[in-house]
Image: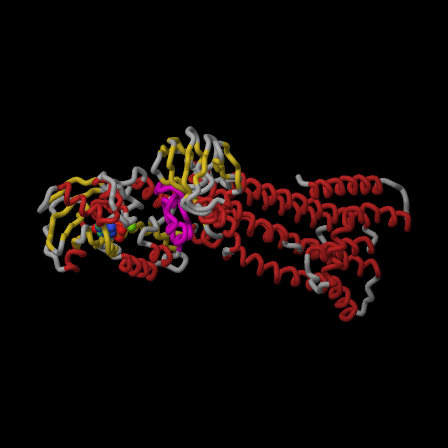
């Protein structure tokens, strides 16, 4: 509890004690009123002040106003205990609410404990701690065991094991050594590292993730918009109903039956109207719905699922179609060379040309070719690189024109090529417009891919689709093994967009379509789908930018997890909406019929709010979903 909350608690205790004392004191008349004003003002002075301010600012219909009118009304009617009691309960509710919200905010920032406080820079043999924001690109920083890596960079000295659990939610240690790129937010576990930074702090992974989580609450879900609209109409509606309730029944009696109602009868109706006002404050809804989303997003980021807004969480919970990209999403994207065929030169030389031509591509195929080649790449030998998305690359290597890619690329360039009869991804190579042979490479499925697809179906997904730029034979084989419903192969990135649009047109309006990719050459599809999910975001800025939901590691099971988290969160939101509105309606009816006292009304209101807030906080716990 913070200072402000403690102060409120003390006021509550003092006012409650005084009130109880006064209830049992046999004093009557104005002295009694005067004595009751003491606990009333102790507990309510700030509410009264806010109500007056509201009136002066012409923003009358807020909770403070309602509480002030209801309690002053009760006191005027001689119901002193009611007046103080209602204020008391209202404050208890407010206190609880601010405590719960503060607590869950703290929870989330603790969960997301990735913000580095400092970076170490070596100066004259000693380490100096500096603000990460002040470190320029290319600076060498030192990270000691147990410390967080503050800024993205490349290890230039040292060897260690990294813990990425703060980012991915998974505590798989990862080995890293000189030459490896490392990202901020990981914890250095064993060795001392010297890292040359490649980005500024503001552009580093940690900052990007924190920005994303912090800004997520500005993207409102439909439920939240519904609630704020609801509150806008509901409060005035109840106020006018209350006014009508106070005046109309006695008036009707007077006009229709010619009976003049006595003071006590007027008092009775006014009391009912005041009860109505007390019930009318919609606190439970206004607080609990955004809090549920906030908790849901926070819990998700704790397990390595970053959701960029409540609206996306809502969409995610309605996903019925999941469309996967193949390479790097369902398969590992680390191809092994399993053969070099029809080569006109030494295998080694062919691989060298291929690896050099691919030297600046970030496609999984090109990375694998460079790895298979194994030697350092002299970029000076490569010029005029052009990547043809979904086809391959062309470049000049040692001044010779080299084309590396699939059959489509060869056709485009008018080069006749040899088919391969083995299943696998085929990388054709042509040098100076002459076919030079092909490299057969094969990818492996991710270990959890099959399980993930089964679980998606269990989680209510109707249709699992795979899109790929790869050859039909490979696509069919992968889809068969994994149990995928529909496959489309040999697609260019633009064809993928068209396919997704086709699928979007066939599904129902309430059914949402998610596209899952790795962010490499599929950004247009990610943004076209109802919801774009990028996986393996550790280290890929493109993926973080393009997607609505970002999975920090590349485990396909995380997709199932993301959907389950979203469903749980939305279930909680709906529970709260129905529960709170239900109880309100019952209370309003009872109040209008004169069957609920003001006491009961405030008690019900605070009770509903406490339950709704506690329920909302459940959305934070998603670890074992
Ligand atoms: P996927 O849809 O499976 O993710 P892509 O659209 O990334 O595949 O690529 C489709 C095909 O295009 C690959 O199977 C490969 O044949 C070819 N290709 C794309 N980029 C490259 C590259 N850099 N080098 C060689 N071939 C490539
Ligand atoms: Mg791809």
Front-most of 531 and 592? 531
- 211 drawn magenta: no
Asked if 222 appears above or below 101 in the picture, the reply is below
Front-most of 182 and 507? 182
- Quadrant where the N terminus sits is top right
Identified at 34% across, 42% down, the residue is 452
Tell me the colour scheme of the image.
secondary structure
333 lies left or right of 406? right
- Viewer can see residue 437: yes
Number of dots carrying numbers? 0
On the image, which quarter does residue 507 sit in? bottom left
Identified at 70% across, 57% down, the residue is 277
375 lies left or right of 573? left
Asked if 172 appears above or below 357 in the picture, the reply is above
Where does the magenta region start and end?
531-557
**Residue 226 image point, x, y percent:** 54, 58
**Residue 625 image point, x, y percent:** 44, 39
501 lies left or right of 100? left
41 lies left or right of 377? right
**Residue 284 image point, x, y percent:** 61, 50
Identified at 27% across, 59% down, the residue is 495
- Viewer can see residue 625: no
Front-most of 455 and 412? 412
Q: Residue furthest top?
A: 190
- 549 drawn magenta: yes
**Residue 337 image point, x, y percent:** 19, 40
């Amino acid at each position: 509890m913070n200072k402000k909350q403690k102060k409120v608690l003390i006021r509550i205790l003092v006012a409650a004690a005084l009130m109880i004392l006064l209830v049992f004191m046999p004093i009557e008349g104005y002295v009694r009123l005067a004595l009751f004003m003491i606990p009333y003002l102790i507990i309510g002075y700030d509410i009264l002040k806010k109500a007056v301010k509201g009136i002066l600012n012409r923003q009358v219909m807020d909770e403070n106003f309602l509480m002030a009118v209801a309690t002053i009304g009760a006191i005027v009617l001689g119901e002193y205990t009611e007046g103080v009691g209602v204020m008391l309960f209202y404050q208890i509710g407010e206190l609880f609410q601010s405590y719960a919200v503060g607590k869950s905010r703290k929870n989330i920032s603790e969960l997301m404990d990735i913000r580095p406080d400092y970076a170490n820079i070596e100066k004259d043999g000693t380490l100096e701690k500096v603000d990460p924001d002040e470190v320029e690109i290319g600076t060498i920083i030192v990270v000691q065991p147990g410390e967080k890596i503050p800024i993205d960079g490349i290890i230039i000295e040292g060897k260690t094991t990294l813990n990425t659990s703060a980012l991915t939610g998974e505590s798989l240690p990862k080995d890293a050594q000189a030459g490896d790129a490392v990202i901020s937010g990981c914890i250095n576990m064993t060795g001392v590292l010297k890292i040359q930074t490649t980005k500024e702090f503001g552009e580093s992974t940690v900052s990007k993730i924190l920005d994303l989580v912090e800004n997520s609450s500005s993207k409102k879900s439909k439920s939240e918009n519904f609630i704020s609209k609801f509150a806008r109409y509901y409060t005035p509606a109840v106020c006018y109903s209350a006014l009508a309730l106070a005046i109309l029944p006695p008036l009707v009696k007077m006009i229709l039956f010619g009976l003049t109602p006595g003071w006590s009868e007027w008092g009775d109706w006014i009391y009912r109207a005041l009860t109505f006002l007390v019930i009318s404050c919609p606190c439970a809804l206004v607080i609990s719905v955004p809090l549920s989303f906030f908790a849901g997003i926070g819990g998700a980021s704790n397990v390595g699922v970053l959701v960029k807004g409540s609206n996306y969480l809502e969409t995610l919970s309605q996903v019925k179609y999941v469309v996967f990209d193949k390479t790097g999403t369902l398969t590992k994207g680390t191809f092994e060379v399993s053969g070099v065929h029809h080569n006109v030169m030494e295998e080694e030389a062919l691989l060298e040309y291929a690896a050099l031509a691919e030297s600046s591509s970030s496609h999984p195929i090109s990375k694998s070719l460079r790895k298979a080649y194994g030697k350092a790449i002299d970029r000076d030998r490569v010029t005029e690189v052009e990547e043809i998305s979904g086809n391959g690359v062309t470049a000049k290597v040692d001044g010779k024109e080299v084309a590396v890619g699939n059959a489509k690329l060869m056709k485009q360039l008018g080069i006749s090529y040899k088919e391969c009869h083995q299943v696998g991804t085929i990388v054709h190579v042509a040098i100076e417009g002459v076919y030079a042979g092909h490299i057969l490479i094969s990818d492996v499925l991710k270990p959890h891919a099959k399980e993930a697809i089964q679980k998606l179906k269990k989680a209510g997904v109707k249709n699992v689709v795979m899109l790929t730029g790869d050859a039909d034979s490979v696509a069919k084989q992968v889809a068969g093994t994994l149990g995928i419903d529909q496959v489309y192969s040999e697609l260019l990135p633009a064809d993928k967009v068209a396919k997704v649009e086709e699928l979007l047109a066939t599904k129902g309006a309430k059914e949402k379509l998610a596209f899952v990719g790795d962010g490499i050459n599929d950004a247009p599809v990610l943004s076209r789908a109802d919801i774009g999910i990028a996986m393996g975001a550790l280290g890929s800025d493109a993926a973080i930018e393009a997607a609505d939901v970002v999975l920090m590691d590349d485990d396909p099971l995380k997709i199932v997890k993301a959907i389950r988290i979203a469903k749980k969160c939305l279930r909680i939101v709906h529970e709260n909406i129905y529960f709170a509105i239900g109880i309100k309606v019952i209370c309003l009816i009872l109040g209008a019929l004169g069957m609920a006292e003001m006491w009961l009304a405030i008690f019900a209101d605070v009770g509903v709010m406490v339950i709704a807030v506690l329920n909302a906080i459940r959305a934070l716990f998603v670890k074992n979903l």
